[in-house]
Image (cartoon, rainbow, N blue to C red):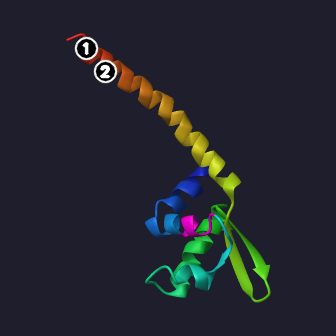
């Protein structure tokens, strides 16, 4: 998984909602689709993107494919965002301090 693939997958709001659904328990395509006003095929396409980005895993249980969040896949995204945070805090501190000097 690359962070670029993960960020591209996460750019779509419905995919983020799907990740929230499969965060705590594995769900089938039909169980996921029941939460949206789109076709099961559309949900399958979103799941394909999430799987290719490495954000979900798929296991087979009888005739069902169950999708679940891969928590370790979020680590790279989290690390990238954490790198941005100190820089943002430093700029904020500089701006606040500059405002006090006026």
Provide residue 49's location: percent of width, then percent of height: 59, 69
Q: Residue furthest bottom?
A: 63
Instruction: Please say whether residue 19 is one of the residues in the magenta stretch.
Output: yes
Circle 1 SS class: helix
Vertical side of 64 occupied by 52: above or below? above
How busy is the neighbourhood of tag 2: few (under 14 within 10 Å), some, or many (20 plus)?
A: few
6 up-or-down from 100: above or below: below
The main secondary structure of the magenta stretch is helix
For the N terminus, the quadrant is bottom right
In the picture as drawn, the residue positioned furthest to the top comes out as 101
Left or right? Give the position of 85 relative to 80.
Answer: left
User: Is residue 13 something one can see in this rendering?
Assistant: yes
User: Looking at the picture, how far across and down is residue 97, in whole percent?
Assistant: 32, 15
What is the secondary structure assignment of the residue under circle 2? helix
Q: Is residue 75 above or below residue 90?
A: below
* Residue extending farthest front: 24
Mark 2–mark 1 contact, CB under 8 Å? Answer: yes
Number of labels in the image equals: 2
83 vs 58, left or right, is left
Residue under numbered circle 2: 96
Locate residue 90: give its quadrant: top left
Q: Which residue is mark 1?
A: 100
Magenta stretch? 18-23
């Amino acid at each position: 998984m690359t962070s670029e693939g993960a960020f591209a997958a996460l750019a779509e709001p419905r995919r983020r909602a799907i990740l929230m659904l499969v965060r705590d328990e594995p769900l089938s395509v039909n169980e996921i689709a029941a939460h949206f006003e789109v076709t099961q095929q559309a949900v399958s396409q979103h799941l394909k993107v999430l799987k290719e980005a490495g954000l979900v895993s798929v296991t087979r249980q009888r005739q069902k494919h169950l999708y679940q969040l891969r928590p370790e896949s979020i680590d790279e995204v989290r690390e990238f965002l954490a790198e941005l945070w100190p820089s943002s805090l430093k700029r904020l501190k500089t701006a606040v301090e500059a405002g006090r000097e006026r």
